[in-house]
Image (cartoon, grey):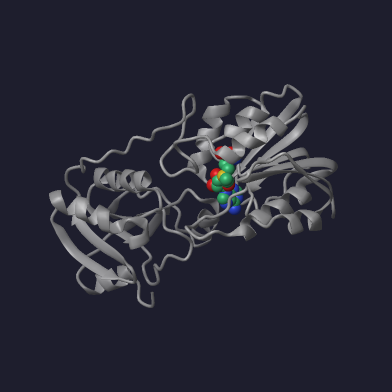
Amino acid sequence: MKYSRLFTALDEGLDLNGTLHILRPPAGYDLATLNDVSVDVSFYPDHQYWHAMGMVGDGVGRVATLVVVPRSKTLARALINEAITAGGLVIVDGQKTEGVEGIYKDLRKNNTIMGVVAKGHGRLFWFEAGILPAWDITVKSPNGYKTLAGVFSETKIDIGSSQLVPHLNALKGNTADLGAGWGYLSREILTHEGVTRLDMIEADKSALDCAVANTNDPRANPVWTDALTFGGGPYDTVVSNPPFHTTRVGEPDLGKGFIATAARILKPRGVLLMVANRHLPYEAELDAKFARVEELAGSGAFKVFRATRPKR
Ligand SMILES: C[S@@+](CC[C@H](N)C(=O)[O-])C[C@H]1O[C@@H](n2cnc3c(N)ncnc32)[C@H](O)[C@@H]1O
């Protein structure tokens, strides 16, 4: 989009005079000449981007809240409710692929929409905060676990992760769960008494907060960071169900980056135990980064790898 929906709206009458607080803007979201802005993000690489621009803040004293519609419908609704509860002007900006049209239809039933910009396969609209919409924002968490709206696999245990569990044998020492999510694998790792410490490495702050609640173990240490640049350790074991995508588009390079990090943070005799969708092309990267790679029993949909002797 050459000229963003937000700047088109500002040209067309969206009146901001005071702090604009933005919920979940991805890195690179166009704020060009705006400077009275604070942002709230959960994904660490986005946080790094906005932090470097000095924009991370809690929105105290804001006159308007802008919600950048995320992929998760429940999270989108929860963020809009948060914006309405904060009061002032509420601005919603999203792509059609993220469901902004349905959100617009819901909100215009009970709110006077003050302006709309429809362009670039999306829509931005704004209204004065009023009553909360009658929509369901409850998260149906898996039994016995806490999850929050928008975290990976918020309603069910991931099948790939559950297929990795039988291969977590006699774990001990210093361990990392790379891409720990809301902590399903972390809790399983901690059932091994030989594990002395577990670093739960995760970019999504909301997921990491859940992982802390779901493990509730003094050996578990949350690390909010980008796994691709993480340099902690060294670890005896790295366990991972790497992410396949951060957007709707699959990005196998993300998983390859996780493999490179695992090789970098393991001890020379350390072990990587990893599960992946069978169609993902990780073998070459595993062979490039480890001297020994075995495919343990997987299924038609998933493959489980054990990789040892990381190459430096
Ligand atoms: C496939 S999920 C696995 C989650 C969890 N281990 C489980 O079994 O439920 C991958 C996780 O990696 C996280 N992630 C994505 N990109 C990341 C990054 N650059 N650094 C750290 N974590 C990341 C995602 O937020 C997600 O929680």
Residue 127, quarter of picture:
bottom left
Q: Position of residue 23 (x, y in %)?
A: 38, 52
258 or 292, nearer to the observer: 292
Compared to 149, does 102 lie above or below?
below
- State the quadrant of the N terminus: bottom left
Outermost front residue? 300
Q: Position of residue 226 (x, y in %)?
A: 61, 51
Compared to 93, does 155 lie above or below?
above
- State the quadrant of the C terminus: bottom right
**In the figure, is residue 94 to the left or right of 296?**
left
Q: Is residue 176 visible?
A: yes
Q: Position of residue 289 (x, y in %)?
A: 80, 55
Name the residue: 67% across, 52% down. 258
Name the residue: 76% across, 38% down. 237
61 or 277, nearer to the observer: 277
Outermost top residue? 193
Q: Is residue 95 visible?
A: no
231 or 165, nearer to the observer: 165
Name the residue: 51% across, 40% down. 207
Callout count? 0
Name the residue: 13% across, 55% down. 112
Residue 253, quarter of picture:
bottom right
Q: Position of residue 39 (x, y in %)?
A: 41, 55
Compared to 180, does 89 lie above or below?
below
